[in-house]
């Protein structure tokens, strides 16, 4: 695995607010080897177009990198690195080699988690049951009631959700729907559940069901 770090002249991590150098390291699981040093030109007055150009010019040297260490992350940089380059950004102070093993383990853990979620989604793709959202923690589930009912037109929301409430222990269930089914607010509150509703800009309703404390 390769990991890059944005550093100053002393070799300590620095933030995305001034120019510096990117050090690339590679591991064979026993030790880390220095691969190369790449200049990274950043200026506070740069606009979005110039920032993207600078990042992509530097990123041509980051092939194989799964993580990028910086002292303090910033929104636009995170978006470009993580959403466009698919390189995870970690905010850490000090010398990169002091924490690089922990960063590697976090990357590996996230990869394993992503694989588990993909396999789980494949298994549950044709199911009407809510899907476990592992990235939110144990006991968190989500169901897109709109999509489920499109595939199962003869089933109403009660047919789909009551078996889950009766047979599963959960901390949070997120229900994506066109509107919160009236029976949920009426019956679940009596069963000591808390129901919260959020309307999103896309017109869909996100209903969250929790166990009342």
Image (spheres, grey):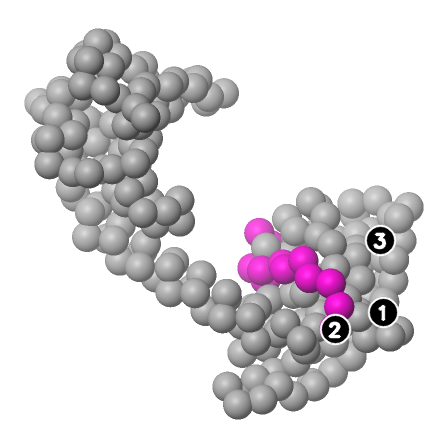
Write down the quadrant of residue 155 in the picture. Answer: top left
Task: Please name which of the two marks, 3 or 2, marks the residue nearer to the observer.
Answer: 2
Residue 149 as seen in the image, left or right of residue 206: left
Residue matched to label 2: 95
Question: Residue 183 vs residue 80: left or right?
Answer: left
The local crowd at label 2, few if under 14, some if 14 to 19, many if 20 or more residues have their Cα within 10 Å, is: some
Query: In 3D space, how far apart are the residues under numbered discs 3 and 2 (Cα atoms)?
Result: 18 Å
Q: Is residue 117 visible?
A: yes
User: Splitting the image into 4 quarters, where does residue 31 fall?
Assistant: bottom right
Give residue 56's quadrant in the image. Answer: bottom right
- Depth check, mark 2 against mark 1: the one in front is 2
Q: Position of residue 98 (x, y in %)?
A: 67, 76
The span picked out in magenta is: 83-95
> Where residue 8 is drawn, which disc sits there?
1
Report the Cα–Cα distance between label 1 and label 3: 11 Å
Residue 8 sits above or below residue 51 on the image: below
Q: Residue furthest front?
A: 213
User: Does 64 appear above or below 150?
Assistant: below
Depth check: give the residue in front, 64 or 195: 195
Name the residue that disc number 3 marks: 17
Q: Is residue 56 visible?
A: no
Secondary structure beneath dot 2 equals loop
Q: N-terminal of the two: label 3 or label 2?
A: 3
**Disc 3 packing (10 Å; few <14; some 14–19; many ≥20):** some
Inspect the magenta stretch and tell me whether residue 57 lies in it. no
**Which residue is located at x 26 percent, y 58 percent?**
119
First in sequence: mark 2 vs mark 1: 1
| Residue pictured at 32% horizontal, 26% vertical | 213
What is the secondary structure assignment of the residue under circle 1?
A: loop
89 inside magenta stretch: yes
């Amino acid at each position: 695995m390769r990991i890059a770090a944005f550093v100053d002249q002393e070799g300590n991590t620095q933030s995305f607010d001034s120019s510096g150098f990117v050090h690339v390291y590679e591991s064979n699981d026993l030790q880390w080897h220095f691969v190369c040093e790449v200049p990274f030109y950043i200026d506070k007055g740069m606009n979005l177009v110039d920032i993207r150009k600078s990042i992509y010019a530097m990123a041509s040297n980051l092939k194989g990198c799964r993580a990028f260490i910086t002292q303090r992350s910033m929104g636009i940089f995170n978006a470009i690195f993580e959403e466009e380059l698919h390189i995870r950004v970690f905010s850490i102070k000090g010398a990169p080699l002091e924490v690089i093993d922990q960063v590697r383990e976090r990357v590996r853990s996230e990869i394993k988690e992503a694989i588990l979620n993909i396999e789980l989604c494949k298994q549950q793709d044709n199911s009407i049951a809510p899907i476990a959202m592992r990235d939110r923690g144990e006991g968190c589930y989500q169901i897109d009631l709109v999509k489920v009912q499109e595939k199962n037109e003869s089933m109403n929301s009660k047919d789909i959700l009551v078996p889950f409430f009766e047979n599963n222990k959960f901390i949070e269930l997120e229900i994506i729907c066109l509107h919160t089914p009236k029976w949920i607010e009426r019956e679940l509150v009596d069963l000591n559940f808390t129901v919260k509703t959020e309307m999103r800009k896309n017109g869909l309703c996100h209903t969250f069901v929790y166990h009342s404390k």
